Structures are given as structure tokens and as C-alpha cells.
Image (cartoon, rainbow, N blue to C red):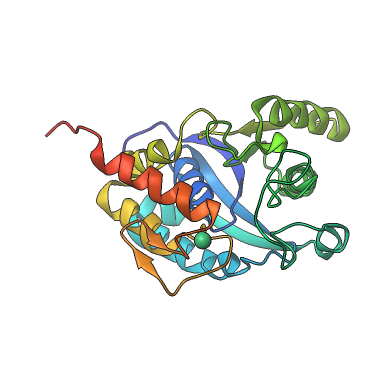
Amino acid sequence: MSMTIQNDTALVLFSGGQDSTVCLAWALTRFSRVETVGFDYGQRHRIELDVRPRIRERLMAMDAGWKARLGDDYVVKLDALAAISDTALTRETAIEIADSGLPTTFVPGRNLIFFSFAGALAYRRGARHIVAGMCETDYSGYPDCRDDTVKAMQVALGLGLDKRVIIHTPLMWIDKAGTFAMAEEIGGAGLLDLVVEDSHSCYLGDRTHRHDWGYGCGECPACRLRARGFAEFKNWPRAK
Ligand code: ZN
């Protein structure tokens, strides 16, 4: 894919999930240097951290330019977040809608904390750009995935660091089907296969059941969203 490469460093919030994997590929087509950061907050689906190195390796094998531009990876341990959280992602709690009207998978403050740490790391690494996979379209109602929240964080980081920080959210206004389509558009069948085979979404950390959309329990909200998105993507009319 030909695209003007901006001579700048971007830090990608890379969890190992479908969204952040596509965001990483997106960043590799735009910035001369791309670094990645992941957060270990005691998530039940901690397996998503294990798939990260393989995704990075496959991306590098896919394109010489991507290989040249993909830089360091950081995993930041955030045990404190697990210690103060009582959610279905960090405890053996049922995944359901809580009294707040939000799913019990909502980890309050999670993305605000991620952005704060990412901002600190970006500052140290001289990265002006932060790329993140937040999405308002099928975001399960998480308020910290909203465009306004992300824009407010961009302003807060810029002020607090006294340095311009630009947060890119390429998936903000597209759904899961659109995310699969974006993967195919950026890296063809190879990237689509990588996203299906190696990125991880299942909240329960299941990598024993293989579906056409990838691995997962098939029942949790993350699996259902991914399965539905893949089915929609497959049914889209395509130019031959
Ligand atoms: Zn699942």
C-alpha cells in the first residue's frame, strides 16, 4: 500500500486484540517509526499479552518497510488497577449488565490510566503521536472509548506534558466488520489472516475453539461482536 510516510514516531496502544492489531498496521503505513505498548492489569484474558510478540513478528515478515519501521515494545505492569477493580475482566465475576447500566466488563478508569502511561512513555520516547483502537460504534457503552473522552485526554496530556500530543483513533467511527475490511485494505489477505488467526478478543481467554473469525469461547460479548462483525464483513459486496 503506498502512502506518504510521516517522519515521526508513533506509540501504539497494542493489546493483542483485533482492534489494536489493525491500528498497529495502520500506524506502520503512516509513521517512520512505530513503537508499541501493552498493559498487564491482571486481565482474565491475559492470553492477549502472549499473542503480541507473534503478531509483531508476522507483521515484520509481511513487509520490509514495516519491519524497518517497527521499533521497541513495552509491557507495563499495572497491578494497582487490578487491585482497585472489581470487574468481570479482572475477577471471576459474571459478564452481565450491572446496576450502572454498563457491562461488568467495564474497568472504570482503564483507558484514562492507559493514556496517562502512554503519554509518559511517548514523552520519554519523543513520540508525538499515540494510536489507539477505541471505537464508539460498537463499544459496549464504555464511556472511556468515546471520542469526546479521547479528545479530552489529548488536551489533558498536551497541557500536562507541555508538549503537543496527537491521539489517533482510526477505528472510532467504524464497526467490527469495518475493522476487518480495513485490515484487508491495508495488508490484503495476509493481514486479514493474521488478524483472524493471531489477534485475541475473547474475554475468557479461550484459544482452544477455532471459528472462521478466529479463536474464542464464542459466547462472551467480545466473541459475539467479533463473530458478527466477521459475518457481516464476509457478506459485503466486493468489487472483483
Ligand atoms: Zn469469548
For residue 150, above or below residue 217: above
Estimate the x, y position of residue 17 in percent, counting from the top left.
Answer: 52, 55
Which residue is drawn at the image coordinates 66% and 51% (left, top)?
Answer: 96
Image quadrant where residue 128 sits: top right
Name the residue located 73 percent from the left edge and 44 percent from the top edge. 111
Q: Where is residue 59 in the image (x, y as percent from the top left)?
A: 41, 58
Q: Looking at the picture, tell me which residue is in the foreground, 128 or 226.
A: 226
Relative horizontal placement of residue 25, taking residue 148 as reference (left or right): left
Q: Is residue 147 above or below residue 108?
A: above
Instruction: Indicate the position of residue 42 as horizontal and vertical percent values.
Output: 74, 66
Q: In this view, does 165 lie to the left or right of 8?
A: right
Residue found at the far left of this picture: 240
Image coordinates for residue 50, horizontal then vertical, percent: 56, 71
Q: Is residue 166 left or right of residue 240?
A: right
Quadrant occupied by the C terminus: top left
Q: Residue at x 24, y 39 (%)?
A: 235
State the image quarter where residue 180 is shown: top left
